[in-house]
Image (cartoon, grey):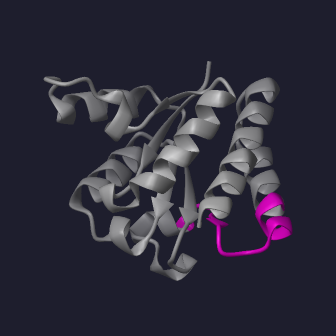
Amino acid sequence: MSSAFISYSVKDERLAKGLYSANTMAGIETFLAGISIEPGTNWTDSIFNKLEEADWVFFLASKNSISSAAVQQELGASLIQRKTIVPLLIDITPEKLPGWVGNHQAIDLRSSPEVQHEAISAIAEKIKIDKFWCGVIVGAIIVGLILLLAKS
């Protein structure tokens, strides 16, 4: 079963929780630090263990997250582990994506739904996982985008 990890700034937690809810409703095991870490747990170990287990990393790319040291560490680990990283642009342009993350196809949440759908479809074609889970994840992203845009 595919799993997802959401990398985000705590300042963008409302948006992260929307994506988490959409993924969970679609049956995707998703890690979101603000929800998934139990009290008393060593959060650094928990974060890096879940990141290692994840197939997908959804990066909520915002002004807040690109200045977060924790997010930078998560992205660095994701790159080293060769995870599929999907940047979701909140309030920045693709040119503002940090380092090598800029080489990953992003979804611009500021764009029209048609452009978002095309970007999601292009990413889905590139990801080499079983077709059923690819469809589930693409569906979850679309639902999540709708929820995120409706709350903005």
Nearest the viewer among 76 and 137 is 137
Whether residue 89 is visible: yes
Picture layout, residue 87 above or below residue 52: below
Res. 69 image quadrant: bottom left
Q: Residue at x 79, y 73 (%)?
A: 112
Left or right, 146 with reference to 85: right
Res. 132 image quadrant: top right
Q: Which residue is drawn at 29% across and 35% down?
A: 47
Q: Position of residue 70 (x, y in %)?
A: 24, 54
Q: Position of residue 37 (x, y in %)?
A: 29, 28
Picture layout, residue 93 above or below residue 89: below
Q: Position of residue 85 (x, y in %)?
A: 53, 50
Looking at the rendered image, the quarter that the C terminus falls into is bottom right
Left or right, 55 with reference to 75: right
Q: What stretch is highlighted in magenta?
A: 103-117
Q: Which residue is drawn at 56% across and 76% down?
A: 94
Q: Does the magenta stretch include residue 126?
A: no
Picture layout, residue 125 above or below residue 137: below
Nearest the viewer among 86 and 63 is 63
Whether residue 84 is visible: no
Q: Where is residue 138 in the image (x, y as percent from the top left)?
A: 75, 42
Total numbered labels: 0
Looking at the rendered image, the quarter that the N terminus falls into is top right
Work out which residue is located at the far front of the displayed protein and give it. 151
Q: Does the magenta stretch include residue 111?
A: yes
Q: Residue at x 39, y 75 (%)?
A: 63
Picture layout, residue 3 above or below residue 87: above
